[in-house]
Amino acid sequence: MLDSLLALGGLVLLRDSVEWEGRSLLKALVKKSALCGEQVHILGCEVSEEEFREGFDSDINNRLVYHDFFRDPLNWSKTGEALPGGPLGALRAMCNRTDLGPVTIALDSLSWLLLHLPCTTLCQTLHTVSHQDSCPGDGSPVGKVHVLGLLHEELHGPGPMGALSSLAQTEVTLGGIMGQASARILCRRPRQRPTDQTQWFSILPDFSLDLQEGPSIESQPHSDPHIPPVDPTAHLTFNLHLSKKEREARDNLTLPFQFSSEKQEALLRPRPSQATSHIFYEPDAYDDLDQEDPDDDLDI
């Protein structure tokens, strides 16, 4: 599945983490695009050009068009080498291309762009670039545009992540187990149900992609049957279970707020032998006993 990512077109998100980095996979896909004869543009914002080109042979490096926004991202040196408009200007310039061949655009990285540009502006530009199907001039068809975006998902909140996820045709989430890398690939195609697959792989020193089988069940960590399991309820200062006698005593206990029928009858119907009480009241001189006008003493 990883080797066919570039055949789908559109925006491909490479979501990595601190534990599983994604730049090696990005460089492997860039090399594959270059070997297929596509034009490859690199927007380098996070590492230097020398570091990104390291590991490629001269044939691959000669096919890469590198836009360096790492050395002078704000064009402070005024050398005239930087494109006007920065990284977004470079992306918009690629929208106005006149060649008809397929193009691969690698963004290293989308996280850098998100931290320095408004999310809405970046999403609008990515949508325009990744959905090109004709030249602006004569409307003739052009080749597919593949946009590879490296995204450090631990740096961003759910808002930007959700916006980019809605734009992407393919999401590749890197992970792994026992030192073996895996890619969970979520692919969305028009008028088709999304597919979700997991591909195990490794990156060779020359940035070739080596697809592998998943780790076998025998190689995965499991519990030793010769070691007795540890009881987590042992050595507690309280009981988690009741004995039979304690359970019977709990069931026979009447709580004070529970009124049984016998208790209600005892409270509502006094016994004949029980002495009755009376209230004796002697009115005061200031007591108003006029029932016709009980508010006479208020001087209303």
Image: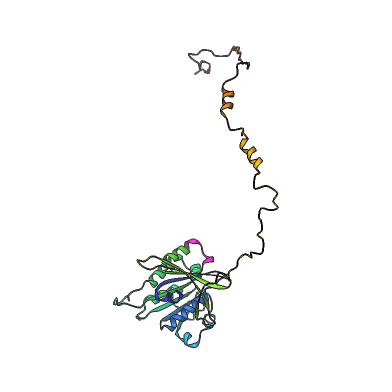
Depth check, front residue: 115 or 197:
197
Q: Residue at x 47, y 78 (%)?
A: 29
For the point 65% across and 42% down, the residue is 244
Q: How many marks?
A: 0
Asked if residue 52 is positioned above or below residue 244 in the image, the reply reads: below
On the question of residue 25 being in view, the answer is yes
Residue range highlighted in magenta: 153-159
- Percent coordinates x, y for residue 292 in the rendering: 48, 13
Q: Position of residue 271 (x, y in %)?
A: 60, 18
Magenta region's main secondary structure?
Answer: helix
Residue at 67% of width from left, 61% of height from top? 228
Please give left or right for residue 62 compared with residue 239 in the image: left
Q: Is residue 66 visible?
A: no
On screen, residue 249 versus residue 82, left or right, reads: right
Give left or right: position of 252 versus 128.
right
Residue drawn at the location 54% of the way across and 73% of the way down: 181
Q: Nearer the viewer, residue 20 or 137?
A: 20
Residue 174, position as x, y percentages in the image: 51, 70
